Image (spheres, rainbow, N blue to C red):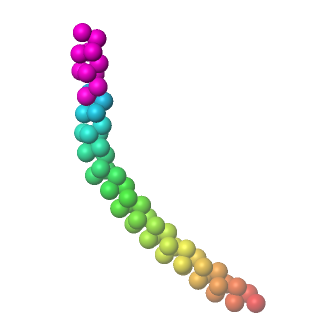
Amino acid sequence: MSSKGSTIKAPKPKLAPIPAVNVKAPAATAVVAAAELHMEKARKLMAAAIAALVIASKHFK
């Protein structure tokens, strides 16, 4: 009886993560896409800030 109990318990942890992964996968891709967009904006902001610093340093010299 105890061996049957352990075999019944064993598949449950294996089955549980599968739907969790399926649910998380689209969310993860959305998060990655959002992060990529954020990084593009951040790069543009950094480029603009660096350009402004270069212009300012030339202006004040």
Q: Quadrant of the image for the C terminus? A: bottom right
Q: Please report the bounds of the magenta region as a residue range.
A: 1-11
Residue 1 percent coordinates (x, y) = 24, 9
Q: Is residue 32 magenta?
A: no
Q: Is residue 43 above or below residue 55?
A: above
Q: Is residue 9 left or right of residue 31?
A: left
**Rendering quarter of residue 58:** bottom right
Residue 54 percent coordinates (x, y) = 65, 85
Query: What residue lies at 30% left-to-right and 37% top-to-bottom?
Result: 17
Q: Is residue 7 magenta?
A: yes
**Rendering quarter of residue 5:** top left
Residue 13 percent coordinates (x, y) = 30, 30
- Prevalent SS, magenta region: helix
**Rendering quarter of residue 16:** top left
Towards the viewer: 55 or 35: 35
Residue 34 percent coordinates (x, y) = 38, 60
Query: What residue lies at 25% left-to-right and 28% top-to-bottom?
Result: 11
Towards the viewer: 59 or 26: 26
